[in-house]
Image: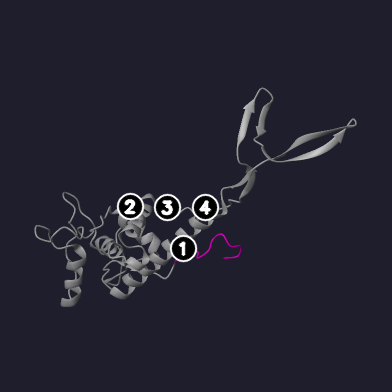
Amino acid sequence: MTGPIGRTGGTKVKRALGVQAALEWAFRVEQAQLELPPPKDVTEEGFGFGLEYVLLQCAMLGCKMDGGQHKMGSYTHPDAEVIAATVADMPQSLGGIRMAISMAELARAGMTPDWMPGVVPRCVPLEIKNNQHGQRATTIVVGTERVKTRGKWRTIELLACPITWRPHPEQIASARRGYEDWRLALDWVRVGLIVGRMLREVEVTSAMPKGHPWRVGD
């Protein structure tokens, strides 16, 4: 993904990447940085214009960036800057800054959110005790019963073993909701990059990660 852009008959050929691959190229290969807005309680005085603002002004003027050195001492491809700026502009309805940071970190690591593939809840004892005889599930008294043994009435305790589910089904559901939220945000970035038409050497395709990879046949 770091090779030169090809040319055919003098026409520049763009590098076609799915949006997830585009983010990994921008953040992992080009090491682009998120230009996040300052906290609301901090005045804008003393701060330079954010990259998103610069890109917006360029779009309004009908021009494109001819730079890519917002990082001190190193070069970052202008297209990577555009991708990073798009991610940084994530709307609150899709997770805002928190989602933007999460997407950038995942892209730098070349990872997809952990949706706990292959995990099935198992019914297990709530607590295990170890003794000289090995492991035993902890029991609790849940009642008493009168029984007659050898001609005498005796009171015996009724014991039960508290159980739980590990991992809990809600943990799995939460992980998969997180994946779905990430994918929605990824699709927003994909559409923004395609509609914005500000990428000069990268073409974002329609390719997307699976919607529900835990479903058979999806």
Q: Do labels 2 and 4 touch, CB within 8 Å?
A: no
The mark that comes first in sequence, 4 or 3, is 3
Q: What's under tag 4, amino acid-wise?
A: Gln
- Asked whether 210 falls inside the magenta stretch, the response is yes
Residue 166 on image: x %, y %: 58, 46
Residue 111 - label: 3
Quarter location, residue 36: bottom left
Q: On the image, numbered disc 1 is attached to which residue?
A: 180
Q: On the image, numbered disc 4 is attached to which residue?
A: 171
Viewer-nearest of labels 4 and 1?
A: 4
The overriding secondary structure of the stretch rendered in magenta is loop
Q: On the image, numbered disc 2 is attached to which residue?
A: 28
Determine the residue positioned at 90% across, 31% down: 151
Q: Do labels 3 and 2 touch, CB within 8 Å?
A: no
Quarter location, residue 3: bottom left
Let me know if residue 204 appears in the view. Answer: no
Viewer-nearest of labels 2 and 1?
A: 1
The mark that comes first in sequence, 1 or 3, is 3
Determine the residue positioned at 61% across, 50% down: 121
The mark that comes first in sequence, 3 or 2, is 2
In the image, residue 158 sits, relative to residue 87, either above or below, namely above
Dot 2, how many residues are within 10 Å of its Cα: few (below 14), some (14-19), or many (20+)? some
Q: What's under tag 2, amino acid-wise?
A: Arg
Q: Say which element carries label 1.
A: helix
Q: Which residues are magenta?
A: 208-218
Viewer-nearest of labels 1 and 3?
A: 1
- Outermost residue, top side: 132
Q: Do labels 4 and 3 touch, CB within 8 Å?
A: no
Determine the residue positioned at 60% across, 37% down: 127
In the image, residue 189 sits, relative to residue 154, either above or below, namely below
